[in-house]
């Protein structure tokens, strides 16, 4: 039952109360006399028993109106395996990501855009892999986006060796789907440089990933920065494009923090979850108890009125 129907049904109770009150004001009982030709108009004065039966009567009617509105109770559940998407954000944390051509720098801009992306996908498992000269899985795909957000905010090169190993980052991200049972998986790979530290060519890694996962996995690559930066690091757009094309995705060229948000919005539209954005809820009807108690109290009020508190002349 939608909200309008629920409102209409519940509105019937006060309407019934008002109608009964108006009719009772007009109702005049005539007292029967045994002498003389006179009739006297008088109102019926209820005793304690009459008030109790009236109270029970109206309470039972209220319960029946609630039952007629068909109330439901529900609870949110997490998607089960096989529902939603599994996504791994693969973030370059090498030294070049600290350049300030983005505000406040490339790495922070990438983090902020990732956080906005995560907030818009509450029903998907999302994980994080960081890489420099070697990769590291920081968080496997999870529904715990609050914890994931903390990992993203704290992401930095730390103990990782300086360098850029795009192929290794991609391989570790794909390995994160080892226990995934979803039909659709996505890797978002971010880089602002060239592969300088990988042991295997990134395109070869992309081909191997495609062989293992096929159409169930798409890779979207994001190239951050201009083709030639002031520090001498350049982004290898050709390699990033090949990685994406091999795995059914596409390359996004980004030259500002604002464009990063637009890229994530584009990926969000391309990889829509089959699950509702407002969560998964299970609803159960709870009108039956109201119906039973309403009928019980109605029967009790009638029993009291006609058997226990019966007035002579009724």
Image: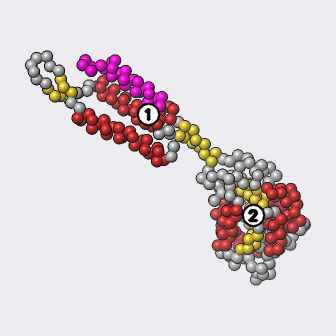
Comparing 56 with 3, the one in front is: 3
Residue beneath label 2, please?
A: 188
Q: Is residue 131 left or right of residue 4?
A: right
Q: Is residue 246 positioned above or below 96 on the image?
A: above
46 and 43: which is toward the camera: 43
- The residue that appears at 76% across and 56% down in the rendered structure is 185
* Residue pictured at 83% horizontal, 71% vertical: 239
The main secondary structure of the magenta stretch is helix
- Residue at the left extreme? 36
- Say whether residue 236 is magenta: no
Instruction: From the top left corner, tell me how far across and down residue 176 is, in percent.
Output: 80, 55
Looking at the image, which residue sits at the far right? 199
Q: Is residue 150 above or below residue 296?
A: below
Q: Quadrant of residue 163?
A: bottom right
* Tag in front: 1 or 2: 1
Q: Is residue 30 above or below residue 117?
A: above
Local crowd size for mark 2, using a 10 Å CA cut-off: few (<14), some (14–19), many (≥20): many
State which region is magenta.
291-314
Residue named by callout 1: 64
For marks 1 and 2, the one nearer the N-term is 1
Viewer can see residue 249: yes
Front residue of 301/127: it is: 301
Q: Secondary structure at mark 1?
A: helix
């Amino acid at each position: 039952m939608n909200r309008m129907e629920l409102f209409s049904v519940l509105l019937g109770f006060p309407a019934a109360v008002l109608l009964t009150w108006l009719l009772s004001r007009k109702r005049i009982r005539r007292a029967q006399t045994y002498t003389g030709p006179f009739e006297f108009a008088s109102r019926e004065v209820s005793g304690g028993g009459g008030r109790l039966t009236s109270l029970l009567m109206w309470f039972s009617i209220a319960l029946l109106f609630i039952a007629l509105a068909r109330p439901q109770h529900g609870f949110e559940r997490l998607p089960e395996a096989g529902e939603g998407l599994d996504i791994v954000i693969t973030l370059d944390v090498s030294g070049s990501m600290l350049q300030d051509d983005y505000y406040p720098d490339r790495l922070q801009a990438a983090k902020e855009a990732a956080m906005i992306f995560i907030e818009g996908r509450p029903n998907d498992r999302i994980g994080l892999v960081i890489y420099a000269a070697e990769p590291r899985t920081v968080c496997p795909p999870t529904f715990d986006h609050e914890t994931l957000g903390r990992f993203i905010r704290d992401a930095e090169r730390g103990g990782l060796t300086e360098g850029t190993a795009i192929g290794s980052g991609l391989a570790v991200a794909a390995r994160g789907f080892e226990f995934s049972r979803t039909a659709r998986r996505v890797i978002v790979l971010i880089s602002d440089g060239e592969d300088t530290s990988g042991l295997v060519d990134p395109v070869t890694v992309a081909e191997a990933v495609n062989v293992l996962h096929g159409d169930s996995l798409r890779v979207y690559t994001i190239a951050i920065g201009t083709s030639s930066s002031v520090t001498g690091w350049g982004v290898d757009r050709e390699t990033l494009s090949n990685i994406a094309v091999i795995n059914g995705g596409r390359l996004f060229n980004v030259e500002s923090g604002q464009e990063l948000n637009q890229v994530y919005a584009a990926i969000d539209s391309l990889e829509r979850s089959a699950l509702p954005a407002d969560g998964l809820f299970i609803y159960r009807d709870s009108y039956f108890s109201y119906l039973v108690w309403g009928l019980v109290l109605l029967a009790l009020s009638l029993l009291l009125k006609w058997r226990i508190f019966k007035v002579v002349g009724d």
